[in-house]
Image (tube, grey):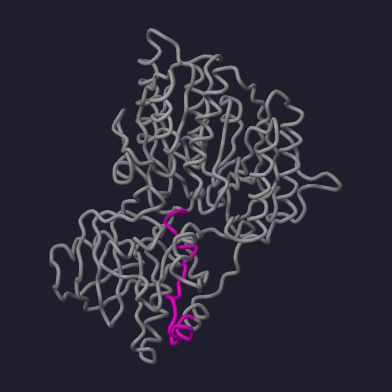
């Protein structure tokens, strides 16, 4: 059996000023054929699993280009078309003499490019044109994506991570690979249905009620015939005509049952709308609470800057929480505070020029977008420089680019030059900070940080600081996203019907 694997993955925040081009893919992950590292990345676990399967079974694996850019704004037309055509040419070469039995795509699913409101749908459609109807096309997706008509029509199998934090990215890669192989072997006859929940929300699975929903999906997948269940959470910062929460069910040989599972789970999600996002507090309450708690001898207090999250496509250079902490420093002098990270490639360059131990005047942060605070001006000590900093996320390594640890007024701040949200405490350790020894840690992430940081902290504060991200769909000025979904309108479902199979 001959299987081709490739992928283009990123997440586009239509409201972000961070334009995305080829350099951004090269800074995060760009793997030419057969150059992908041994370890999986968030969206490329299927490739790593396919290598294992190819070693064990009679599979000829043809690797194409896989790439990932950290979430940002619109992807340039040139960038998308270059990467797409690279992959299409690789497929043309692969099918010159022999057809492909399967194509596995390592996608994210929330890309928007100049002139393309559904790049992944465009990619899958063009691959289908090349390989024909007999080739099985499967794709792994991030749930923060858009389930568009094209990708549903032209792919046979779509599976998304269930967990948020996406700690199950490897299992999802294994799952899509297994389903593609079993379909090629005619062991299964997958029927894929979707259900439009007509809503958009944020669904961390680390908290109830979403924890139970994910557990229920996993329990249902153990039932005979249920091949895969995926909830597409949707991505509210992506102004896509297909934005919204949708349920995918894949059932063996029975479309009616696939539709039933998609509807049942879709209706469950409608019932828990508005309840899944942990409560956030303002920067004033977050910092006052953190200082008050930090006086006890305890694990670090983590303040998560949930919306200034580069993982959601914003710059990640906001200073609102840091400034609020600095304003209170006079009365909390001995509190140990570390901030990881603030994106500022210019400030990092200046630190590198000055060198370790230099004491320099530095302006950093809040340069990219309104409503993210003001740049901070300090005389800082350059404590540590790392030209290739990275953090871990499970077995994967997440690049942070050239990074500088600076210190002033007893506060330590990591400045990075490749935007990356906080995943794990290794973010601090790799820059020379023992995070457990700190009183307050400020990180930027909506929820991906949770699994890693709950290991070292018994107090996590979700903070809503500034307005870097369009987190209120009712107020967001969408041009393309559907307007007839909750919470933009109160009841898009009518009664007694809820949502619809499409
Ligand atoms: Zn995601």
Residue 349 placement, left or right of 417? left
Q: Is residue 475 left or right of residue 24?
A: right
Query: Does residue 29 show up magenta in the picture?
Result: no
Q: Is residue 279 above or below residue 216?
A: below
Q: Residue furthest bottom?
A: 331
Image quadrant in which you'd find residue 349: bottom left
Counting from the top left corner in percent of width and height, residue 255 is at 73, 26
Identify the residue at horizontal 60%, vertical 41% (top origin). 241
Q: Residue furthest right?
A: 496
Residue shown at the point (41%, 71%) measured from the top left: 442
310 within the magenta span: yes
Task: Identify the residue at image location x=44%, y=41%.
Answer: 43
Give the magenta range. 290-312
Which quadrant of the figure has residue 149? Answer: top right
The location of residue 346, given as percent across then percent down, is 24, 61
Q: Position of residue 4 (x, y in %)?
A: 42, 23
Residue at the (34%, 80%) spot, across then down:
336
Between residues 494 and 443, which one lies in front from this camera angle?
A: 443
Which residue, as the protein is rendered here, is positioned at the far front? 56
Which residue in the rendered view is the most extreme toward the top?
A: 97
Residue 288: x, y in percent?
49, 83
Answer above or below: position of 282 versus 419.
below
């Amino acid at each position: 059996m001959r299987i081709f694997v490739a992928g283009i993955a990123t997440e586009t925040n239509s409201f972000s000023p961070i334009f995305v081009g080829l350099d951004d893919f090269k800074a995060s992950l760009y793997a030419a054929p057969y150059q992908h590292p041994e370890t999986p990345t968030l969206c490329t676990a299927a490739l790593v699993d396919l290598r294992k399967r190819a070693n064990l079974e009679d599979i000829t694996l043809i690797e194409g280009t896989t790439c990932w850019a950290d979430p940002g704004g619109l992807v340039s037309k040139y960038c998308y078309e270059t990467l797409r055509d690279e992959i299409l040419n690789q497929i043309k070469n692969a099918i010159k003499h022999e057809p492909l039995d399967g194509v596995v795509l390592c996608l994210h699913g929330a890309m928007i490019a100049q002139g393309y409101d559904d790049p992944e749908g465009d990619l899958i459609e063009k691959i289908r044109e090349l390989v024909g109807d007999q080739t099985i096309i499967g794709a792994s997706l991030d749930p923060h994506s858009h389930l568009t008509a094209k990708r549903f029509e032209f792919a046979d199998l779509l599976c998304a991570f269930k967990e948020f934090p996406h700690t199950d990215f490897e299992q999802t890669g294994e799952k899509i690979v297994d389903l593609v192989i079993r379909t090629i072997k005619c062991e299964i006859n997958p029927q894929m249905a979707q259900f439009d929940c007509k809503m958009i929300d944020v669904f961390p699975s680390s908290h109830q009620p979403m924890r139970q929903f994910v557990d229920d999906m996993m329990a249902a997948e153990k039932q005979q015939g249920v091949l895969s269940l995926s909830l597409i959470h949707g991505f509210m910062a992506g102004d896509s005509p297909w934005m919204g929460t949708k349920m995918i069910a894949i059932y063996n040989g029975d479309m009616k049952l696939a539709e039933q599972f998609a509807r049942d789970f879709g209706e469950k999600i409608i019932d828990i709308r508005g309840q899944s996002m942990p409560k956030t507090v303002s920067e004033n309450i977050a910092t006052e609470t953190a200082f008050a708690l930090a006086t006890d001898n305890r694990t670090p207090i983590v303040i998560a800057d949930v919306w200034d999250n580069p993982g959601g496509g914003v710059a990640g250079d906001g200073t609102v929480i840091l400034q609020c902490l600095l304003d209170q420093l006079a009365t909390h002098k001995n509190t140990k505070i570390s901030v990881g990270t603030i994106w500022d490639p210019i400030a990092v360059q200046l630190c590198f020029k000055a060198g370790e131990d230099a004491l320099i005047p530095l302006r950093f942060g809040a340069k990219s977008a309104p409503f993210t605070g003001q740049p901070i001006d300090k005389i800082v000590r350059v404590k540590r420089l790392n030209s290739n900093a990275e953090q871990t996320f499970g077995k994967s390594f997440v690049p942070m680019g050239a990074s500088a640890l600076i210190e002033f007024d007893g506060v330590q701040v990591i400045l990075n030059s490749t935007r990356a949200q906080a995943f794990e405490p290794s973010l601090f350790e790799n820059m020379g900070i023992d995070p457990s020894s700190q009183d307050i840690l400020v990180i930027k992430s909506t929820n991906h940080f949770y699994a890693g940081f709950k290991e070292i902290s018994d107090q996590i504060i979700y903070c809503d600081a500034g307005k870097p991200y369009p987190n209120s769909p009712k107020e967001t000025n969408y041009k393309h996203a559907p307007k007839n979904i909750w919470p933009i309108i109160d009841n898009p479902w009518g009664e007694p019907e809820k949502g619809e199979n499409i």
